[in-house]
Image (spheres, rainbow, N blue to C red):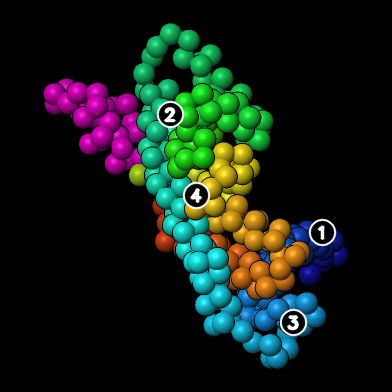
């Protein structure tokens, strides 16, 4: 190999090594907390206080699991069901609403369409914590504070999902197909439900996954809206237990075990739906 070829190859190898190093550090940064959580969930309280996670002593996975669902009269199970209702049902309905709005922005012409869409884009940049107080005041006026609906209704509307819905509609639903459906006598609603929505399946799954993750990890809104522990989601319930652990150390193992179980639905959703999610991310990439 010539000297010129070696000199050209060296920066390429150096760049590849740098990229691999960055990827490796990123993977470690992501996986080490999960590994700690898995190891900590198998330890009893004394082992946790000693930070003795790699030793076989103090193994208490089964006991921690039993204690988790027995603590405070089985309250964790109720929180888990609440989170599933808030997140799964809310993400499903929210994804349908977002994709329908995005489809309307893409396929229909109406006055001030782009200005309204600009407001949607502006709403994407508004932090959810800023909206918590106005939402609380509105829920208070409607008499919904400390109810299931106070948390469920606000998560149904997601500006970012509307933006994604428009992108997916533009990438997946050709105008010619809708024209053909209209010529066959299909109305607008029928054309959307029977034709467009099927094409929007990958985009719908992608918006659903984003919504599911955001709602499952939602903490501030339930904390503002709810005072009844029976209505808490897992995130808020574990926070309450973790606060109580400073006085009652027996909460520490169950908080760790509860945190591990709280990760499982998101992992399962991404594993089961990753094929649709990957194809949804390429919407509009190829024309």
Marks 1 and 4 sit apart, C-alpha to C-alpha, by 58 Å
Secondary structure at badge 3 equals helix
Secondary structure at badge 1 equals helix
Query: Which residue sits at x=69%, y=91%?
Result: 56
Give the foreground label among 3 and 2. 3
Query: Are the residues flagged by discs 3 and 4 in contact, CB closer than 8 Å?
Result: no
Q: Quadrant of residue 96?
A: top left
In this orientation, does residue 277 appear? Answer: no
Query: Which residue sits at x=62%, y=33%?
Result: 132
Q: Position of residue 256 (x, y in %)?
A: 64, 69
Marks 3 and 4 sit apart, C-alpha to C-alpha, by 32 Å
Residue, disc 2: 102
Marks 2 and 4 sit apart, C-alpha to C-alpha, by 32 Å
Query: Are the residues flagged by discs 2 and 1 in contact, CB closer than 8 Å?
Result: no
Chief SS of the magenta region: helix
Of residue 152 and residue 16, the one placed in the foreground of this image is 152
Residue 172's place in the image compared with 62, above or below, is above
Q: Residue furthest top?
A: 111
Comes first in the chain, label 3 or label 2: 3
Residue, disc 3: 46
In this orientation, does residue 136 appear? Answer: yes
Residue, disc 1: 11
Marks 3 and 2 sit apart, C-alpha to C-alpha, by 53 Å
Comes first in the chain, label 3 or label 4: 3
Marks 1 and 3 sit apart, C-alpha to C-alpha, by 52 Å
Of residue 181 and residue 117, the one placed in the foreground of this image is 117
Query: Are the residues flagged by discs 1 and 3 in contact, CB closer than 8 Å?
Result: no
**Magenta-colored span:** 173-200
Give the foreground label among 1 and 3. 3
Comes first in the chain, label 2 or label 1: 1
Mark 2 closeness class: few <14, some 14–19, many ≥20 residues within 10 Å:
many
Res. 231 mark: 4
């Amino acid at each position: 190999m010539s000297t010129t070829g070696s000199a050209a190859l060296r920066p390429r190898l150096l760049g590849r090594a740098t990229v691999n190093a960055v990827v490796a550090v990123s993977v470690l940064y992501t996986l080490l907390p999960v590994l700690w959580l898995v190891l900590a969930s198998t330890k009893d309280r004394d082992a946790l206080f000693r930070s003795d996670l790699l030793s076989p002593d103090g193994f208490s996975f089964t006991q921690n699991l039993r204690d988790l669902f027995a603590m405070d009269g089985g309250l964790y199970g109720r929180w888990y069901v609440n989170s599933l209702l808030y997140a799964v049902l809310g993400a499903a309905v929210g994804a349908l609403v977002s994709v329908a709005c995005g489809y309307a922005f893409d396929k229909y012409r109406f006055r001030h369409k782009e200005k309204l869409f600009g407001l949607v884009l502006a709403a994407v940049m508004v932090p959810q914590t800023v909206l918590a107080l106005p939402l609380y005041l509105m829920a208070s006026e409607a008499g919904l504070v400390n109810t299931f609906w106070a948390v469920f209704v606000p998560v149904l509307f997601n500006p970012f999902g509307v933006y994604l819905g428009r992108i997916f509609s533009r990438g997946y639903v050709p105008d010619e197909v809708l024209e053909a459906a209209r010529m066959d006598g299909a109305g607008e609603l029928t054309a959307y439900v029977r034709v467009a929505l099927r094409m929007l399946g990958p985009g719908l799954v992608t918006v659903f996954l984003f919504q599911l993750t955001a709602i499952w990890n939602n903490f501030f809104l339930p904390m503002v809206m709810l005072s009844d522990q029976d209505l808490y989601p897992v995130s808020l319930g574990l926070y309450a237990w973790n606060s109580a652990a400073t006085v009652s150390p027996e909460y520490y193992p169950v908080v760790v075990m509860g945190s591990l179980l709280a990760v499982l639905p998101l992992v399962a959703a991404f594993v089961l739906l990753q094929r649709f999610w990957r194809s949804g991310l390429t919407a509009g990439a190829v024309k």
